[in-house]
Image (cartoon, rainbow, N blue to C red):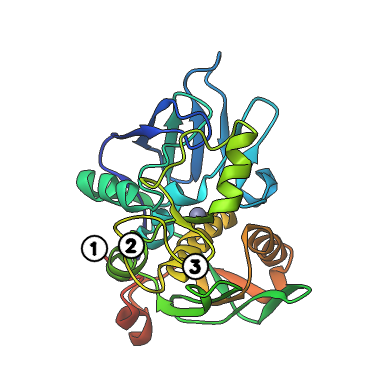
Amino acid sequence: MFLQKTIRKKVVVQGIGIHSGDPCNLTFRPAPSDTGVYFIRTDLPGKPSLKVAAKNVLATAHQTTIGGADFSVATIEHCVSALSALRIDNLFIELDGPEIPICDGSAGAFLSALLEVGLVEQDQPRKYCSITEPIYYSDGEKHAYVVPYHGLRLSVTIDFPHALIGKQKIDIDINEESFGRDVAKARTFGFLKDVEALKSRGLARGGSLENCIVLDHHEVVNPEGLRWQDEFVRHKALDALGDLVTLEMPLMGHVVLYKAGHDVMNKLVRKIIESPQSYRHIELGADLSLEARQTGWVAPN
Ligand SMILES: [Zn+2]
């Protein structure tokens, strides 16, 4: 029987907000069984909270924002993407301001913090959303689908009209090891002309070459260059894993994305939720298939 998991104890990630440039602190805290993942604004009266759920997604332009009556939190995907890989079911994420620390623009700092304190099994079984029939969503040339699979697999293709990016593809079984090795440290990226436009509107004041890959017409502006030649598509896989947390349940399926950003991911997750004929809620136990063990994704710690 695979039990739900949370973290052993609280851990803090410090940084600055990408838009304000101000210091901010994020605290991961253990949460009880059957809680899910919540953001809590500790600086606001009454400490309002909001669940990471597709129905709470407010905006999907360039990043994913969740919001409710009390507050919203932008760019949630980097700090929650590790939860999909580590299979953390229950977690409180406290923020002392409106922004999540951007860190180096990847999920590396969040993954390190979670691994540093470690995970603990809880008293309730984990329920997976196991895809039994394909579910498809498209919007023009962007498309996304999920088909049955014995673990969690991502195939992501991007195509940007830039000499350094072009068409890139990643195809990966997601587990703690593969996420840490191939995905977690891939940074977000932007184009110089867009960065300048954001700054002229008073946004991205915290944005710098410390937390974003910046491309001009021909090359990478960052003096240290890229971490991988295909860092761009690896980052898109990171983003997609973050968005999958809004499903509120670990996915067993193969997600295939073509030019799909946060908007398409949100539509896909909503479509999965609205298609109960195409998935089953399952618990995994001693009858776990050999293939599922081999992917490593569902293997016990
Ligand atoms: Zn991102």
Under tag 1, what secondary structure? loop
> Residue 218 got which mark?
3
Residue 223 locus on image (x, y percent): 32, 56
Q: Is residue 144 left or right of residue 157?
A: right
Seen in the picture, residue 17 relative to 6 is either above or below; the reply is: above
Give the distance between the C-alpha atoms of the residues marked 3 and 2, in whole angstroms.
13 Å
For disc 1, the marked residue is 301
Give the residue type at disc 3: His
Q: Nearer the viewer, mark 3 or mark 2?
A: 3
> Going 35% across and 63% down the picture, which residue do you hit?
2
Identify residue for label 2.
225
Q: Given contact means CB atoms under 8 Å apart, are the residues at marks 2 and 1 in contact?
A: no
Residue 87 image offset from top left, x and y in percent: 38, 58
* Numbered disc 3: secondary structure: loop
Q: Earlier in the sequence, mark 1 or mark 3?
A: 3
Looking at numbered disc 2 in the image, what kind of residue is underneath it? Gly
Closer to the camera in the image, 25 or 7: 25
Q: Earlier in the sequence, mark 2 or mark 1?
A: 2
Kindly report which numbered mark, 2 or 1, lies closer to the viewer in this rendering: 2
The residue positioned farthest toward the bottom in the image shown: 290
Marks 2 and 1 sit apart, C-alpha to C-alpha, by 35 Å
